[in-house]
Protein backbone atom coordinates (compact mmCIF):
# COMPACT_ATOMS: atom_id res chain seq x y z
CA UNK A 1 0.00 0.00 0.00
CA UNK A 2 1.24 3.45 -0.88
CA UNK A 3 -0.50 6.66 -1.79
CA UNK A 4 1.05 9.99 -2.71
CA UNK A 5 -0.16 13.44 -3.65
CA UNK A 6 0.86 17.06 -3.21
CA UNK A 7 -0.72 20.24 -1.95
CA UNK A 8 0.22 23.90 -2.35
CA UNK A 9 -0.24 26.45 0.39
CA UNK A 10 1.30 27.68 3.61
CA UNK A 11 1.15 25.20 6.52
CA UNK A 12 0.27 27.08 9.71
CA UNK A 13 2.29 27.15 12.89
CA UNK A 14 0.97 25.31 15.92
CA UNK A 15 2.05 28.22 18.09
CA UNK A 16 0.11 31.27 16.94
CA UNK A 17 -2.01 30.25 13.96
CA UNK A 18 -5.64 31.24 13.88
CA UNK A 19 -8.34 28.61 13.54
CA UNK A 20 -9.02 30.02 10.08
CA UNK A 21 -5.43 29.31 8.96
CA UNK A 22 -5.46 25.81 10.48
CA UNK A 23 -8.80 24.92 8.90
CA UNK A 24 -7.72 26.49 5.61
CA UNK A 25 -4.58 24.37 5.36
CA UNK A 26 -6.42 21.18 6.32
CA UNK A 27 -9.07 21.95 3.68
CA UNK A 28 -6.38 22.36 0.99
CA UNK A 29 -4.72 19.06 1.90
CA UNK A 30 -8.06 17.20 2.15
CA UNK A 31 -9.20 18.56 -1.23
CA UNK A 32 -5.99 17.47 -2.97
CA UNK A 33 -6.14 14.07 -1.30
CA UNK A 34 -9.78 13.61 -2.35
CA UNK A 35 -9.03 14.74 -5.92
CA UNK A 36 -6.16 12.24 -6.19
CA UNK A 37 -8.38 9.45 -4.87
CA UNK A 38 -11.16 10.41 -7.30
CA UNK A 39 -8.74 10.52 -10.24
CA UNK A 40 -8.09 6.80 -9.78
CA UNK A 41 -4.46 7.13 -10.85
CA UNK A 42 -3.08 5.13 -7.94
CA UNK A 43 -3.92 1.65 -6.75
CA UNK A 44 -6.01 2.06 -3.65
CA UNK A 45 -6.03 0.17 -0.44
CA UNK A 46 -9.19 0.10 1.66
CA UNK A 47 -9.68 3.66 2.88
CA UNK A 48 -9.27 4.93 5.46
CA UNK A 49 -6.25 2.73 6.15
CA UNK A 50 -6.40 1.19 9.63
CA UNK A 51 -2.97 -0.41 10.02
CA UNK A 52 0.44 0.93 10.98
CA UNK A 53 1.75 3.32 8.39
CA UNK A 54 4.59 5.62 7.47
CA UNK A 55 3.91 9.28 6.67
CA UNK A 56 6.47 11.04 4.50
CA UNK A 57 6.14 14.78 4.07
CA UNK A 58 8.52 16.96 2.08
CA UNK A 59 8.11 20.75 2.18
CA UNK A 60 9.38 22.83 -0.76
CA UNK A 61 9.29 26.53 0.18
CA UNK A 62 9.37 29.09 -2.62
CA UNK A 63 11.37 31.52 -0.44
CA UNK A 64 14.07 31.15 2.19
CA UNK A 65 11.65 32.17 4.93
CA UNK A 66 12.21 30.08 8.06
CA UNK A 67 9.62 27.42 8.83
CA UNK A 68 9.50 24.96 11.74
CA UNK A 69 9.22 21.52 10.22
CA UNK A 70 7.32 20.07 13.17
CA UNK A 71 4.71 22.82 12.89
CA UNK A 72 3.97 21.89 9.30
CA UNK A 73 3.46 18.26 10.17
CA UNK A 74 0.72 18.67 12.78
CA UNK A 75 -2.04 20.03 10.55
CA UNK A 76 -0.89 18.08 7.49
CA UNK A 77 -1.34 14.78 9.36
CA UNK A 78 -4.61 16.00 10.87
CA UNK A 79 -5.89 16.66 7.35
CA UNK A 80 -5.42 13.09 6.15
CA UNK A 81 -6.93 11.23 9.08
CA UNK A 82 -10.58 10.31 9.42
CA UNK A 83 -10.84 11.02 13.15
CA UNK A 84 -9.74 14.68 12.78
CA UNK A 85 -11.82 15.17 9.63
CA UNK A 86 -14.96 14.04 11.46
CA UNK A 87 -14.21 16.30 14.44
CA UNK A 88 -13.61 19.29 12.15
CA UNK A 89 -16.80 18.63 10.17
CA UNK A 90 -18.87 18.46 13.35
CA UNK A 91 -17.30 21.67 14.70
CA UNK A 92 -17.85 23.53 11.41
CA UNK A 93 -21.29 22.07 10.67
CA UNK A 94 -20.11 20.32 7.48
CA UNK A 95 -20.69 16.88 6.01
CA UNK A 96 -17.72 14.65 6.94
CA UNK A 97 -15.45 13.78 4.04
CA UNK A 98 -15.20 10.09 3.16
CA UNK A 99 -11.90 10.74 1.36
CA UNK A 100 -9.26 10.39 4.07
CA UNK A 101 -6.16 8.22 4.03
CA UNK A 102 -5.82 7.12 7.64
CA UNK A 103 -8.37 6.10 10.23
CA UNK A 104 -6.34 7.94 12.90
CA UNK A 105 -2.85 9.40 12.97
CA UNK A 106 -2.19 7.29 16.07
CA UNK A 107 -1.46 4.51 13.58
CA UNK A 108 1.49 6.38 12.09
CA UNK A 109 4.53 4.37 13.22
CA UNK A 110 7.14 6.48 11.43
CA UNK A 111 7.27 10.04 10.18
CA UNK A 112 9.87 11.21 7.69
CA UNK A 113 9.88 14.93 7.01
CA UNK A 114 12.23 17.33 5.32
CA UNK A 115 12.30 21.00 4.34
CA UNK A 116 14.00 21.16 0.93
CA UNK A 117 15.23 24.60 -0.06
CA UNK A 118 16.16 24.42 -3.71
CA UNK A 119 19.05 26.57 -4.85
CA UNK A 120 20.24 27.21 -8.41
CA UNK A 121 23.10 24.87 -9.22
CA UNK A 122 22.49 22.66 -6.19
CA UNK A 123 21.22 19.12 -6.30
CA UNK A 124 18.82 16.99 -4.28
CA UNK A 125 19.65 13.32 -3.81
CA UNK A 126 16.55 11.15 -3.82
CA UNK A 127 15.14 7.87 -5.06
CA UNK A 128 14.18 7.95 -8.74
CA UNK A 129 10.54 7.14 -8.03
CA UNK A 130 10.06 10.28 -5.94
CA UNK A 131 11.27 12.73 -8.59
CA UNK A 132 7.91 13.27 -10.39
CA UNK A 133 5.95 14.12 -7.23
CA UNK A 134 8.76 16.37 -5.95
CA UNK A 135 8.93 18.26 -9.26
CA UNK A 136 5.13 18.57 -9.43
CA UNK A 137 4.90 19.93 -5.87
CA UNK A 138 7.66 22.49 -6.38
CA UNK A 139 6.46 23.57 -9.85
CA UNK A 140 2.89 24.09 -8.59
CA UNK A 141 4.18 26.16 -5.67
CA UNK A 142 6.36 28.29 -7.97
CA UNK A 143 3.39 28.88 -10.28
CA UNK A 144 1.25 29.98 -7.33
CA UNK A 145 4.06 32.23 -6.06
CA UNK A 146 4.28 33.97 -9.44
CA UNK A 147 0.81 35.51 -9.00
CA UNK A 148 1.35 39.17 -8.06
CA UNK A 149 0.43 39.93 -4.46
CA UNK A 150 0.06 36.28 -3.47
CA UNK A 151 1.49 34.73 -0.34
CA UNK A 152 4.59 32.69 -1.00
CA UNK A 153 3.37 29.10 -0.74
CA UNK A 154 5.04 25.77 -0.15
CA UNK A 155 4.74 22.74 -2.36
CA UNK A 156 4.15 19.81 -0.02
CA UNK A 157 4.64 16.23 -1.22
CA UNK A 158 2.79 13.73 0.98
CA UNK A 159 3.12 9.97 0.87
CA UNK A 160 1.53 7.36 3.10
CA UNK A 161 2.50 3.72 2.93
CA UNK A 162 2.12 0.64 5.04
CA UNK A 163 4.66 0.13 7.78
CA UNK A 164 6.17 -3.28 7.10
CA UNK A 165 9.67 -3.20 8.43
CA UNK A 166 11.91 -1.07 10.59
CA UNK A 167 14.52 -0.19 8.00
CA UNK A 168 12.52 0.75 4.89
CA UNK A 169 13.47 3.41 2.31
CA UNK A 170 13.03 7.12 2.95
CA UNK A 171 10.71 7.49 -0.04
Image: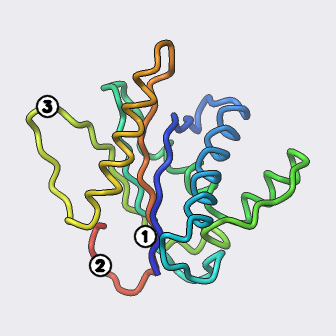
Q: Depth check: 93 or 52 in front?
A: 93
Q: Are marks 2 and 1 in contact (CB under 8 Å)?
A: yes
Q: Quadrant of residue 13?
A: top right
Q: Depth check: 71 or 99 in front?
A: 99
The percent position of residue 116, horizontal first and vertical second, equals: 28, 43
Residue topped by disc 2:
168
CA distance for labels 3 and 2: 31 Å
Mark 3 element type: loop
The percent position of residue 36, horizontal first and vertical second, equals: 55, 61
Between discs 2 and 1, the one toward the N terminus = 1
CA distance for labels 1 and 3: 32 Å
Q: Residue at x 17, y 49 (%)?
A: 124
Q: Are marks 1 and 3 in contact (CB under 8 Å)?
A: no
Is the residue 17 above or below the residue 125 in the image? above
Q: Are marks 3 and 2 in contact (CB under 8 Å)?
A: no
Q: Residue at x 33, y 82 (%)?
A: 166
The quadrant of the image that shows the C terminus is: bottom left
* Number of residue marks: 3
Q: Residue at x 27, y 73 (%)?
A: 169
Q: Residue at x 12, y 45 (%)?
A: 123
Residue topped by disc 1:
110
10 Å crowding of disc 2: few (<14), some (14-19), many (20+): few
Between discs 1 and 3, the one toward the N terminus = 1
The percent position of residue 66, horizontal first and vertical second, equals: 37, 28
Residue topped by disc 3:
120
Mark 2 element type: loop
Q: Is residue 102 left or right of residue 163?
A: right
10 Å crowding of disc 3: few (<14), some (14-19), many (20+): few
Is the residue 22 above or below the residue 30 in the image? above
Amino acid sequence: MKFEFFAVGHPPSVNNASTLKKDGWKAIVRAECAATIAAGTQPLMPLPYERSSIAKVYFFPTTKQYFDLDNGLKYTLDAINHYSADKDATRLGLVPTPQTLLIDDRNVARIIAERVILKPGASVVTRTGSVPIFIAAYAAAMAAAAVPGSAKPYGVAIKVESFRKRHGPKW
